[in-house]
Structures are given as C-alpha cells and as structure tokens.
Image (tube, rainbow, N blue to C red):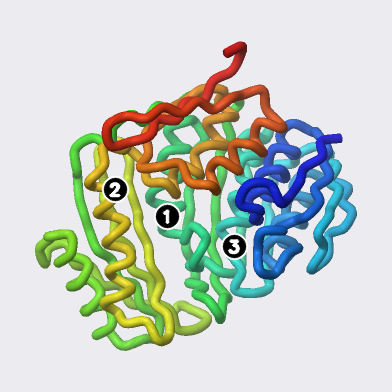
Amino acid sequence: MTRIDGSMGEGGGQVLRTALSLSLITGRPFQIDNIRAGRQKPGLLRQHLAAVLAATEVGAAQVEGASLGSRCITFAPGRVRAGDYHFAVGSAGSGTLVFQTVLPALMMADGPSTVEIEGGTHNDAAPPFHFLARAFTPLVRRMGSDIQLTLERYGFYPAGGGRFRATIQPVQHLAPLHLEHRGETASRRVIAILANLPRRIAEREVATAASLLAWGPDAHVIESTSESGGPGNVVLVEIESTQVTGIFTAFGQKGVSAERVAQIAATEAREYLASQAAVCQHLADQLLLPMALAGAGSFTTVNVNRHAWTNMAVIQQFLPVRFETSEGRGYTKVEVATGPE
C-alpha cells in the first residue's frame, strides 16, 4: 500500500485528489494521513469528501475515514466503470475539482461516460468552469480523449447551486503533448460575468482590465445570467493563441472595488504576455497528470509554483515518470520522461 503524507509541499487538497485519480488508474491502494495539514481548516471539507465519494463510486472502491473533518483515509480501488454519474458537493465547494478527480480514470475507461456535477462552478482558489472548458479540455482532446462540457447553471460562492455536465469519450492511450510556444494570438477578450448584480460593475471591470492591457473596446465582453443560485461576479482575461488558450480570473467580493478585481486578472495576464511561456502557471499544474499518463510531453510556463511541485511529488509515487525542469529566457520548461535518467 502506498503511504502519503498529506502535509507534503503546500499541504492542500490537491495531494488527496491526485492520489485518488492515480489510485483509480493504477489499481494501487493508498493511505493518506495529515489531509490538508497546510490549510486553516485541516481535514476533509465537503468538496474533498465529495471527491472521495465520487472516486469510490467510479472505481467500486473500499474506503475508510470518509467523513467530514477526517484527516486520514484508506482507499482501495476496484475496477473503474464507465457510465452515467451524478455527484453533488452539497455546498459552494468546487464541483470542477471533483470533476478533475474522476476525469483521468474515466477518460481511460472501457466506454463513454457522462458526469453531472452540482456545486460551485466559479470559486476562488479552484479552476472555474470556463477555464476547464476553454483552456484545459481542448488540450486533453488533442491528447486523444474527447471531452465536452456544458454549463447548465452558475454556482458562485457562497450560494453554490451550480450544475454542469460532461461527456467523456475515452482513449486507450493518451498521446504526448508538447507546448513549447503559444503561437500567434488569435483573439483576446476581457469577459465580465454577472449573476444578479448591476451591469455597471461589469462595465467598470472590462474598461479597467482592457486599459491596463492596452486593449481597445473591441475586447470588452459583458455576460449576464439569472441562472445562478445567488449573486456572483467573475472577470476572465482570455488570450487565445494558435497552440493554447490562457485564462486569468478574479472574483468579485464584498468590499473589493470593481477596478481592483479587474486589476488582479489583468496583472496576471500581463505577466504571462511579457514572458515567452506557452502556458500559465495554473494550466501548467493541470497538465502534469495527463502528461504523466501519456508517459511523455513538455511545456514552457511562467514559473513552477509550489502547488505544481507538490503535484509532481504525488504523481511520482504512483507512476514511473520523472519531471525535469530547465530555465530559459522568459520561461521555465517542464519535461515528462520515463526510463533511466
């Protein structure tokens, strides 16, 4: 049995989620202690428990310690089953992170699957639905697994109540992906999404972010929805290039001005544009696991953060791969390799 210290690296929920994903794929049981030891509220919160229960259902697993607040679980997977699944987080906790936990196993299963998830769709500190749909899954499709996402209802913090659906066509072997350059810019947009809030908030956001990026009014996009469990606001700076799409987000909060929210997203986008990197640091972290499953691949990124280093360490406990990094002018290159060094 593989034993994992949940306090390793940044000590967050990604340690657990990656272990669940790879346990399902490899069939290797594991025990994890000190779950989320690096967080203010350690142990399983609702979204982490939802990920454990989802993985248990997909992999017909035996699990011990699956309860709110638990800091230790033992997980022994059975056979991964393709099929139709419905998972509910039961709070505004991130449904996208639950989806990413079971996705690797389902995209390598023995048949197609559909997954419907209820919970948060646009949360701070988690990839929002738009990031998955426009930045992450298009790259996974290039690796061979056809994934289609549909947003049915927004779920902003703190109300939650969102819902999205995924259809997954599996592939026997993922193809390696190499992202050395982002390519020519095809489009660039500042998108402000509002749920049950005044339009003037979005107008200030898109104007501020576009100004900071020296983009004209043609880049302004405002979207409003009443399909949401409560009020919410997110700013997305989207840079679509021929090889990859970068999405940089910031969420509206009480007491934070529209201009400040826009500045957060625009600043991260400017850092990316000033670099020579193909992918942003968030997408870099998301690509590590599928590239490791492919057994090869590479990308250049702005920087490798602690979250990504932690993810690499967990992956290497389950798969015979290694991650090699090297510094270039304006980027860090990450390569996935197998075999002797």
- Which residue occupies the foreground of this view, 222 or 171? 222
Residue at position x 68%, y 33% in the image = 110
Residue at numbered disc 1: 131
| Numbered disc in front, either 1 or 2 | 2
Q: In the image, residue 16 lies at what x, y percent? A: 70, 50
Quarter the N terminus occupies: top right
Residue at numbered disc 2: 272
* N-terminal label among 2 and 3: 3
Q: What element carries label 3?
A: helix
User: The disc labelled 1 sits on which kind of residue?
Assistant: Phe
Residue at position x 88%, y 47% in the image = 62
* Left or right: where 139 falls relative to 15: left
Residue at numbered disc 3: 95
Mark 3, Cα crowd under 10 Å, few <14 / some 14-19 / many 20+, is many
| Numbered disc in front, either 2 or 3 | 2
In the rendered view, would you say 93 is above or below 33? Answer: below
Q: What element carries label 1?
A: helix
Q: In the image, residue 335 lies at what x, y percent? A: 47, 26
Q: Quadrant of residue 321?
A: top right
Q: What element carries label 2?
A: helix
